Image (spheres, grey):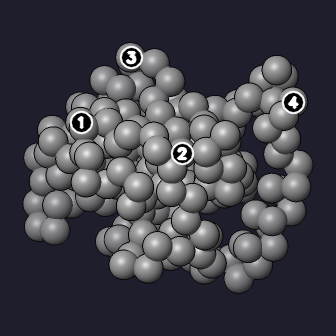
């Protein structure tokens, strides 16, 4: 699956239609392990929330896999190449905040450069304090069913490079918007 060359322009355009003052957004990931519904934290990371919402609205995550699972730590997805090396073709600035990285927290993956996040995200499987203030936490599982799905993925058998032995597929990412 290739990333369109104009994806940044598409995401920027979709982002202009996102209004956190009038609307509450959630992102739902339909996976072959169950649903993962995610609440957003625009009060501490509006840029990251806009980015994942716009990518999901554009169908970017549909068909991608969780390519990395580390038991007791996190599950990671959002790579278009499926191996942890890909992204959307642009990067967003870090929005470090004081939200703790704990079970169910949605955070953005990045390289050593704090401003290198793009589309790859991870969801924590437990409390991971060494990530606090170093990675942008920007949401959390919305309900127990979603956390249960994350935890189920978190104990799946892995092969080389922490990749699940059985593909964990995001069949569809859907954005739900509710007026405040």
Residue displayed at 39% across by 76% down: 111
Label ID, residue 138: 2
Distance between the alpha carbons at the discs numbered 1 and 4:
32 Å
Disc 4, SS: loop
On screen, 81 above or below 133? below
Structural distance between the alpha carbons of marks 3 and 4: 26 Å
Rendering coords of residue 120 (x, y %):
46, 62
| SS type, badge 1 | loop
Please tell me which of labels 1 and 3 falls first in the chain: 1
Query: How far is mark 3 from mark 2, CA to CA?
Result: 18 Å
Q: Residue at x 25, y 32 (%)?
A: 151
Q: Is residue 75 above or below residue 152?
A: below
Cα distance in 3D space between marks 2 and 1: 16 Å
- Foreground disc of the pair 3, 2: 2
| Distance Cα–Cα, label 1 vs label 3 | 14 Å
Q: Residues within 10 Å of mark 3 (few under 14, many from 20)?
A: few
Q: Circle 4: is it few (<14), some (14-19), or many (20+) Cα within 10 Å?
A: few
Q: Position of residue 159 (x, y in %)?
A: 11, 60
- Viewed as shown, does residue 85 lie left or right of 49? left
Which residue lies under the disc numbered 1? 126
Q: Earlier in the sequence, mark 1 or mark 4?
A: 4
**Residue located beneath label 3 in the image:** 144
Is residue 125 visible in the rendered structure shown here? no
């Amino acid at each position: 699956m290739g990333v369109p060359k104009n994806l940044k322009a598409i995401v920027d355009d979709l982002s202009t239609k996102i209004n956190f003052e009038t609307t509450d957004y959630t992102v739902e990931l339909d996976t072959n392990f169950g649903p993962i519904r995610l609440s957003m934290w625009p009060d501490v990371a509006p840029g990251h929330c806009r980015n994942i919402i716009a990518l999901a609205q554009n169908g970017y995550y549909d068909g991608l896999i969780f390519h990395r699972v580390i038991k007791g730590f996190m599950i990671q997805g959002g790579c278009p190449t499926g191996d942890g090396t890909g992204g959307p073709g642009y990067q967003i600035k870090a929005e470090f905040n004081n939200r703790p990285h704990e079970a169910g927290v949605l955070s953005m993956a990045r390289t050593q450069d704090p401003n290198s996040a793009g589309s790859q995200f991870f969801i924590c499987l437990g409390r991971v304090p060494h990530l606090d203030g170093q990675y942008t936490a920007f949401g959390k599982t919305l309900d127990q069913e979603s956390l249960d799905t994350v935890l189920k993925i978190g104990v799946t058998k892995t092969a080389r490079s922490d990749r699940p032995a059985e593909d964990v597929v995001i069949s569809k990412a859907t954005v739900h918007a509710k007026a405040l």
